[in-house]
Image (cartoon, rainbow, N blue to C red):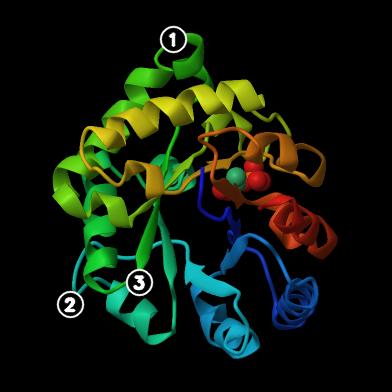
Amino acid sequence: MSHRTLIVGNWKMHGSHPANAELLAAIVAGRPYLADVAVCVPFPYLSETAVALSATDIRWGAQDCSAHEQGAYTGEVSAAMLHEFGCRFVIVGHSERRAYHAESDQLVADKARMALKHNLTPIVCVGETLAEREADQTDAVVKRQMSAVIHTLGHCISQIVVAYEPVWAIGTGRTATPEQAQGVHALLRLQLHAATSKSNDMHILYGGSVKPDNAAALFSQPDIDGGLIGGASLKAADFVAICRAGR
Ligand code: PEP
């Protein structure tokens, strides 16, 4: 990997005005980082996040967007709106959305396309469940999830960020070993390579119980270009330590 590591915090449905102010101030105070750093926050907090970070090199984003441009879609938020709030990133296809909101591979791909159309970088999450891993289906599942996105985006695929997040490792304290994660990242890189000559420039992040004590080992793998951090991104000291483990 020749480019800088990318570390992205996924706050999920956590936060409050005072907690956000404290956390964002600590992330800013922890600079400089060798890695590129971003936080993906709940929609209502985008405005205060933009105010807190706009004079810094820390970027921000959202955790989902609509696959539609605009219209009668009550409760949804469009990619154009996120762009108005200065978002650089939007997570799409997080396993919690695939599982609890029945998001299909194609819907995730359509969201990624809409994000790119509005100058946002989609962070497309893929990953297998524990049952799928135990049934030896890991490779087939992540390839299927990725191929819907490749098919939909065509040559624009090089503009996305991929996050490999084994579902069994998310929020469970159970991390994939660096070697396990590297194996899947290499597979994804190969698949992307068949679709774009720029696959080596793309970021493939690992997510799933990344903590200060396992971050450096994960980020040192050749095809792991950073991390998508859930629980540990809410604890200022942990998130800053993980960001410092990036290169
Ligand atoms: C995530 O939600 O993207 C995630 C990786 O969560 P955690 O770090 O808590 O496992």
The reply to whether residue 11 is visible in this rendering is: no
Identify the residue under disc 2. Answer: 71
Mark 2 CB within 8 Å of ligand 1: no
**What is the distance, in whole Å, between disc 3 and disc 1 at their CAs?**
38 Å
Q: Amino acid at mark 1?
A: Asp
Which of the labelled discs sits on residue 136, or is there none?
A: 1
The reply to whether residue 26 is visible in this rendering is yes
Could you tell me the amino acid type at mark 2? Gly
Measured as percent of width and height from the top left, residue 152 is found at: 15, 47
Q: Could you tell me the amino acid type at mark 3? A: Gly
CA distance for labels 2 and 3: 11 Å
Density class for disc 1 (Cα within 10 Å; few <14, some 14-19, many ≥20) is: few
Task: Give the residue drawn at x 23%, y 62%.
Answer: 67
Instruction: Estimate the x, y position of residue 29 in percent, counting from the top left.
Output: 80, 77
Is 126 situated left or right of 53 in this image?
A: left
Q: Which label is found at residue 23?
A: none
Residue 190 image-quadrant placement? top left
142 to 39, vertically: above or below = above
Image label count: 3
Q: Earlier in the sequence, mark 3 or mark 1?
A: 3
Badge nearest the viewer, 3 or 1: 1
Q: Secondary structure at mark 3?
A: loop
| Helix, strand or loop under label 1 | loop
